[in-house]
Amino acid sequence: MEEKKLVQLSREGNQEAFAELVKKYKTKMFNLAFGLTRNHEIADDMAQEIFIKTYFALPKFKFKSEFGTWLYQIAINHIKDYLRKEGRIKKVLFEESRQNTFILENETIRKEKEQSLEQRKKLIHQAIQTLPQKYQVILSLRDIQGFSYEEIARILKLSPGTVDSRLHRARKMLRKKLAPFLNLKGGNYEM
Amino acid sequence: MKCKKAERFLSKSFDGLLKNKEKEELQRHLKSCLHCQKKRKEYQSILETIRKKDFPEPKPYFWKRLQPKIEERKKYEPWSLWKQWGIRAIPLALLIVALLAASIVFFFPHQNEELSQSEVLLLRNMNPLQETRTLLEEEGVEDKNMMLIFAAMEEKK
């Protein structure tokens, strides 16, 4: 069935129609939450909460945008609330992790300069979680979820120019945070 | 090109959004700037890592777990439907009230009300004290205080 029809039926309380929409978007919502929290349990709970909010907000949906875009807007707001509450804790975790990485680096730097992918991944995601919310969100949408600038502009209700500058600022902040751990040198400029 | 602009171009280059001219400009800068070469590697390392899709699946029975939560939440939001229509009803009710008020004003004009004596006097812009005295005399009202005031006024004259 067409998505618009499913939304229409869901608005009227048809749970089978809403189940279809959930089936279509559950992985996307889960991925969005997982990309920002890196926690399976929390991401699953968040995805469920996002759909509950969506269900009760359906009467307010006016079909002015795509349902998917609107759903992402709800999801982003929900995740922002979570990040606002969790922000401080994550900052502490990253600081602890930084210290641990220093110790780890000292132990292994002579044997192996390259950090393992898993370790790097963990560190990068911890660093992302210490960024201000708006930068976490834009990084997640572009670099984790792979949305285009135009799609991000629609979801966040921003101009493409703002998306561009905010994304650049977010990446720059992340690079500065991570530079001491990446252990990279210049020398190869080929693109 | 300055390093600040080069960094902006670097970031954009990972989205494939650089024009040919910008690409050439960036490459020229990178050839001569070790600092920006390092930055490029850092961006590459970070972006390659976070762009790797390593998402697990949501837990099984997603809908079966979700449905009872929605039902449960419905109990706490029994007014959700009312709210939906209630909010829409507010402007409608205001419109009806405004229309009723307008119809009363236009279709039922005020009847000419008779003015009281004192209002007539005020409209004529007459001395209120003098006229009040006349009124009191006409109506035969005897007020000691008023009489004293009038007596004092006459004495001054």
Image (spheres, coloured by chain):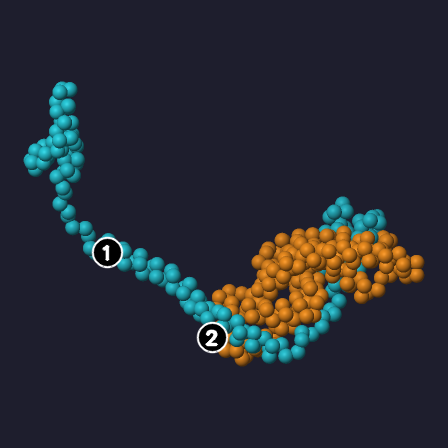
Residue type at mark 1 is Ile
Residue type at mark 2 is Glu
Q: Residue at x 78, y 58 (%)?
A: A97
Q: Is residue A157 visible?
A: yes
Q: Which residue is mark 2?
A: A12
Q: Is residue B147 above or below residue A131?
A: above
- The spot of residue B115 in percent (x, y) is 14, 43
Q: Which residue is mark 1?
A: B104
Q: Residues within 10 Å of mark 1 (few under 14, many from 20)?
A: few
Find the residue positioned furthest to the front.
B144
Q: Residue under mark 2: which chain is it in? A: A
Q: Residue under mark 1: which chain is it in? A: B
Chain A drawn in what color?
Answer: orange
Q: Residues within 10 Å of mark 2 (few under 14, many from 20)?
A: few
Q: Is residue A53 above or below residue B123?
A: below
Q: Residue at x 50, y 78 (%)?
A: A14
- The spot of residue B149 in percent (x, y) is 15, 27
Q: Is residue A189 visible?
A: no
In the rendered structure, the answer to whether residue A101 lies left or right of residue B100 reads right
- The spot of residue A117 in percent (x, y) is 82, 65
Chain B drawn in what color?
Answer: cyan
Q: SS for tag 1?
A: helix
Q: Nearer the viewer, residue B12 or A128?
A: A128
Name the quarter where the N terminus of chain A is drawn.
Answer: bottom right
